[in-house]
Image: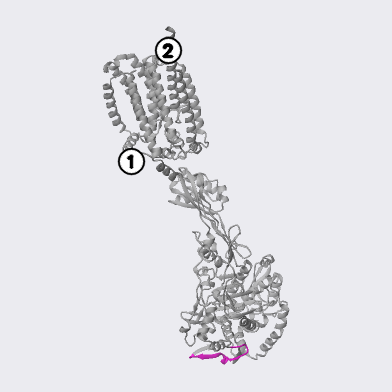
Amino acid sequence: MKNLVRIILTLVIILTVFGAVMVFTASSTYSAEKFNSIYYLFKSHLWKVIGALTALVIVSMIPYEVYKKHSKYMLLGTILILVLTFFFAQKFKGASRWIDLGLIRFQPSELAKLVLIIHLAAFIERKGELIQDYKKGFRLALVWIIIVCGLIFIQPNASTSMIIALIAFSILFVGGARIKHIFFTAGTAVVTGLGALMLFPHSRSRILSFFESLNSGGESNIQVMQAKIGLGSGGFFGVGIGHSRQSDLFLPESYGDFIFSILGEETGFIGTFIVLFIYLALFFIGLIIAKKAPDTFGQLLGFGFSFNIIINAFINAGVVTGLLPTTGITLPFISFGGTSIILFSMSIGVLVNIAKQTLHKQELTLYQV
Amino acid sequence: MNNKRALAVLLLIICFFVALIVRLFNIQIKEHANYKAAAERQQNSSVKLKAERGLIKDRNLEVLAYTQNDVSIYADTRMLSASERGTIASKMSKAFKKSKDHYLNLINSASGNICLEEKVLMNKIEELNKPYIDGFFISEDFTRKYPYGSLASHVLGFVSEEKEGVAGIANYYNDELKGIDGIKFIENDVIGRTVSVNDRLTQRPQQGNTTILTIDYNLQKILEIELKSGLKEYQGEWAVGIIMDPNDGEILALANFPDYDPSNYNLFDNSSLRNRAVTDTYEPGSTIKPIILSILFEEKLANENEIINTENGVYSINKVKIRDTHKFSSLSVSGVLKHSSNIGMAKLSSRVQPDVFFKYLRNYGFGNISAIDLPGEAAGLLKKPTHYSVVSQPFMSFGYEISVTPIQLITAFSALINGGYLYKPHLVKSITDPTGNVIREFKPERIRKVVSEKTSDRIKKLMLKAVEEGTGRNARLTNVFAGGKTGTSQKLVNGSYSSENYNSSFIGYFPAEKPEYIILVLISSPKIGKYGGYVAAPVFKNIAQQIVESDILIAPDENKIKQMRRPIDAVLVDIKKESANPSVFATSNLSPESNNNQKNNSSFTPGIMPNLINDSMRDAVSKLNNAGIEYKIIGSGRVVSQSIQSGSKINKGLVCLIKCESVKNISNLRIN
């Protein structure tokens, strides 16, 4: 258990430090261009890294059972924030996704994701076997999922809402819900979701262009094309850290959602492989921690948070490599982006706490024996 | 937690992982080359670096043409927003001191690329402090500079917008001068701004080679000043002047008027751009007579003292009348040349077999290009003996039915006076690389021997007489002996010889015994005077006089000249007083200045134009006042030219133009 904690912390620190370097090389041209200093975005990122690591340490010391007690109220609060966001947040690229808290610009959907995971984990533990019953268990969970996803969907942020739904159904799946229920509701959700997606012009065009690109073999948009040029020109060993040419404004937002492309350009196939493998390793360790957790809440919490990290990472990589249509999803611990790195660090903090609690309880059992 | 289901999720995630890795493998390794090529396509660009054109220098390494690396500033209006236009306009107005609206209107008036400032100095760009704006750019725009303006324009030629030499040396030696363009490989960012330069692939442009001419800046200047004032004075249509070294074919100066400014060549018409010295042919008239005579001497068909019946000025061959300006009943062969008798020449020429006659003229270079290093040379016309009519050979003997270019004539004449060797005329001494190492050297090229040294000497003696005593008296120099021959030919206008349009020429050389310089002066259609001896000879004299003064290698011969001339002049004065033989000076306008030419500066006769050349302005003015002549002064310093030739009669109401130059300017001419 102790080793697992050490490994998970090491991996997270590796990703964070490597990420900071990547943010620097990917953002320097843009910073120089926009803010007259190549360090501008890098500095802002460094502050967030420090905040994230601090948050990780603090959260790892809070016993995870605390979340179970207050999960319902936390979720209600989050839903309130989402409603407020919808009405009051600044419009950004046709969507009101951000809340400006003065100090930090904050994306409530990211928080909602974590809080929903916590609440679903708590809900499933409380219902026990009842989760297999549609009317008494599954339907109630579904209500929460629909409220949260629906509010995020109408921001509009369809992709995040779909990812949250995916994570929520995965937790229900692992938590013991009936596969029949899951497939029916998920099927309905996908059909209604896709139908609703066609209502928003920006998501409609993205989806249509993605399917068009599958047919024609062309590129769905310039960003993905430039991302692939970056990855492709990296080759096996990459062009070397700091030698990216695509970050010279060829690839828009090269330091944010598309940082994986710059990573691939500078460190090559070796770099992308190792980074993806680290995510896989994080998930695997997360699963072990979850499996060994003493209670169902801890298990599902550990699974949900681990799954959240890897699904973000892989969907991001899928988008950058052109496997999936473009969504606004960050690469955990690496992308430049305010709330993302802090919330992911906090979920690692929770995982560490679960591991610590498990260890503590094992020791207690040993004493009792 | 359901472990089996968690395992299923893990398996799905591993599938996703494998899918991603396969995808990455495809992109990063399998298609690496394609993506790399695509990356390079957008990240790199190449720019042609125009090579700097080589210098043109005169024989003393005075720079006559160089290249200034100016830049032009452009705006691409398609890429500019309204605020960017404002920024550009205000930056430009600050740097170039023009109003902001000027630039704003300029930008707004265009629909694509527009040049805001053309060919500005490189250091202006620093002043501009150019902001990075897409569509606001600077491009190198070399300017060819000619420090002396139109000086030697027909020799230098000019360079087109595309930086190719179009005329003159610029064209003939274009490959040497233009250099080798370089190429610069640039890594650029998305806007096209340079991120870095790839030094490995970049090839620097190589500056063109330096061409060192045989032209002498000082002689060129003298030639141009005198030729221009001569053309103006006699109101000719155009003029050609060439100074050459008869002993090796080097052209020392070559000028045409009207001329042009090579930096603004497009403002001039074809007539100004034409280098008539090589492209235009004319019938040389009497200037060919010494050459014809050399054939007779070489073939031993005549000697100097033989008496020829010159028929009192009119003679018919097959009903075609030949006339002499100066009518004599008979003349010695030497007198035929001295008084330029056409009849005498016609009779003498009939002694030569047509094919021999043709062979010599061919050997002198007529009918063939001289192969001078200038483009567009004309070959002239030399009839073949089979095409001769009865009058062809007689007419050719005094310079009709044969057409030559000025360069051909001076080249042939050089052979005539240098001992018989025909040299290829050339304008370039050597070509060096930009650092001064000689790459090519052009040695004098002797083409063939045309006549013997003895013949050459005999002809020279006759030509000395032609200047000292004959039609070329206006060419007499005060400090050395010169030889030469006048020429006056009627121009062919619409197929018949015009009685109003003449080509007046003089070709002369000095020092007479061992010529160092040969000068050809040709003035076409002068309105004042028509005879070469009246129009062109004084121009020759003015040029030659200055050269003698500036060339320390020519020993002045003044005492000898005085000794020789005194008795002759006395005789001439006597002749004039008695009007003993009026036919000697049949043309009245030739006689008056003949004896006034050598007039002492301090004495003058009222009504006769005094010589003012080299006088101080004050002296000149007092002389003019004493003589009662109205005058106008241009410039200040010493008198360098006067519009009324000294010794001419002054008609009332005539205004004399006096051109003065400060002593400094004059002494500049004598540096060499």
Q: How is the image coloured?
A: one colour
SS of the residue under disc 1: loop
In the picture of the structure, the residue carrying the numbered disc 2 is A362
Magenta stretch: residue B318 in it?
Answer: yes
Query: Can see residue A256?
Result: no
Q: Please, is residue A53 above or below residue A247 in the view?
A: above
In the picture of the structure, the residue carrying the numbered disc 1 is A217
User: The numbered mark 2 sits on a residue in which chain?
Assistant: A
The kind of residue tagged 2 is Gln
Q: Quadrant of residue B154?
A: bottom right
Say few, some or many: other residues with alpha carbon within 10 Å of mark 2 (under 14 / 14 to 19 / 20 or more).
some
Q: Please, is residue B415 above or below residue A255 in the view?
A: below
Do the CB atoms of the residues marked 2 and 1 lie less than 8 Å apart?
A: no
Q: Quadrant of residue B661?
A: bottom right
Q: Please, is residue A363 above or below residue B129 in the view?
A: above
Query: B85 or B40: which is nearer to us?
Result: B40
Viewed as shown, does residue B353 lie left or right of B548?
A: left
Magenta stretch: residue A36 in it?
Answer: no
Q: Position of residue A231 (x, y in %)?
A: 42, 37
Say few, some or many: other residues with alpha carbon within 10 Å of mark 1 (under 14 / 14 to 19 / 20 or more).
few
Query: Can see residue B409?
Result: yes
For the C terminus of chain B, which image quadrant? Answer: bottom right
Q: Position of residue B535 (x, y in %)?
A: 59, 78
| Magenta-highlighted residues | B302-319
Viewed as shown, does residue A369 lie left or right of B451?
A: left
Query: B635 or B520: which is nearer to us?
Result: B520
The kind of residue tagged 1 is Gly
For the N terminus of chain B, which image quadrant? Answer: top left
Q: Position of residue A237 (x, y in %)?
A: 45, 37
User: In the rendered structure, which disc, 2 or 1, sits on the residue that comes first in sequence?
Assistant: 1
Mark 2, mark 1: which one is toward the viewer? 2
Q: Position of residue A76 (x, y in %)?
A: 37, 19
